[in-house]
Image (tube, rainbow, N blue to C red):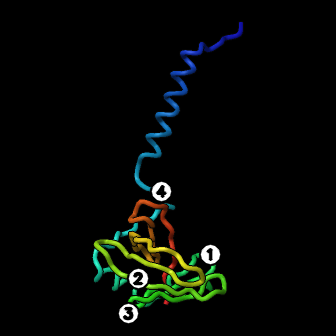
């Protein structure tokens, strides 16, 4: 004799499986997730980000350097990158003049183990992770 499971029982079983999956995913961050310390003041920003190359982790030939004098310079996809920056409240606000003009974007910055995380639009955008170099 063939046994069949009724729709309500299948629904309960599916709900139990989904609840278990959500409980597993709601725990501590996985080994792939990184914890970044958010920079909230200019002195901490300067200590971590003034001077070193801030590089594309996939291609270190793409990089920029934040300078103490309020300038940004580097190379991106073979083109010269230039711009200016200022600190406002808890955000790094930058404009780019080359390789193409880009309007001001105030970003939330964080650091972790030789990496920088930038989050555009005052921390409301998507994060981008860069490697920190010499």
Q: Write the residue at 51% across / 68% down.
A: 128
Question: Is the residue under label 3 in contact with that under label 4 (CB below 8 Å)?
Answer: no
Q: Is residue 111 placed above or below 27 in the rendered structure?
A: below
Query: Mark on residue 85?
Result: 2
In this rendering, would 115 be left or right of 7?
left
Q: Height in image: 126 above or below 91?
A: above
CA separation in Å, label 3 and label 1: 28 Å
Quick one: 41 or 18, which is closer to the camera?
41
Residue at 50% in and 27% down = 15
C-alpha distance separating marks 2 and 3: 9 Å
For image coordinates 47% across by 87% down, the residue present is 72
Q: Earlier in the sequence, mark 4 or mark 1?
A: 4
Q: Which mark is residue 58?
A: 1
Kindly report the distance in space between the C-alpha atoms of the residues bearing marks 1 and 2.
25 Å
| Mark closest to the chain's N terminus, 3 or 1 | 1
Q: Specify which label sits upstream in the sequence, 2 or 3.
A: 3
Between the C-alphas of marks 4 and 2, the distance is: 34 Å
- Cα separation between marks 4 and 3: 39 Å
Residue closest to the far right: 1
Q: Position of residue 91 (x, y in %)?
A: 35, 72
Residue, disc 4: 30
Q: Secondary structure at mark 2?
A: strand
Per the image, the residue denoted by label 3 is 69
**Vertical arrangement, residue 7 with respect to residue 94, above or below:** above
Q: Secondary structure at mark 3?
A: loop
Q: State which mark lies toward you, 1 or 2.
A: 2
- Location of residue 55 (image quadrant): bottom right
Callout in the foreground (3, 1): 3
Give the percent coordinates (x, y) of residue 96. 50, 81
């Amino acid at each position: 004799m063939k046994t069949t499971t009724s729709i309500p029982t299948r629904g309960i079983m599916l709900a139990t499986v989904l609840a278990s999956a959500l409980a597993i995913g709601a725990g501590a961050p996985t080994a792939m997730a990184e914890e970044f310390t958010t920079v909230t003041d200019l002195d901490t920003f300067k200590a971590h980000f003034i001077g070193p190359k801030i590089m594309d982790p996939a291609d270190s030939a793409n990089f920029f350097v934040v300078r103490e004098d309020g300038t940004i310079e580097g190379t991106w996809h073979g083109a010269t990158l230039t711009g200016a920056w200022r600190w406002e409240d808890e955000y790094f606000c930058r404009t780019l003049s080359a390789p193409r003009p880009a309007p001001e974007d105030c970003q939330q910055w964080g650091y972790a183990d030789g990496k920088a995380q930038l989050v555009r639009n005052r921390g409301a955008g998507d994060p981008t992770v860069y490697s920190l170099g010499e």
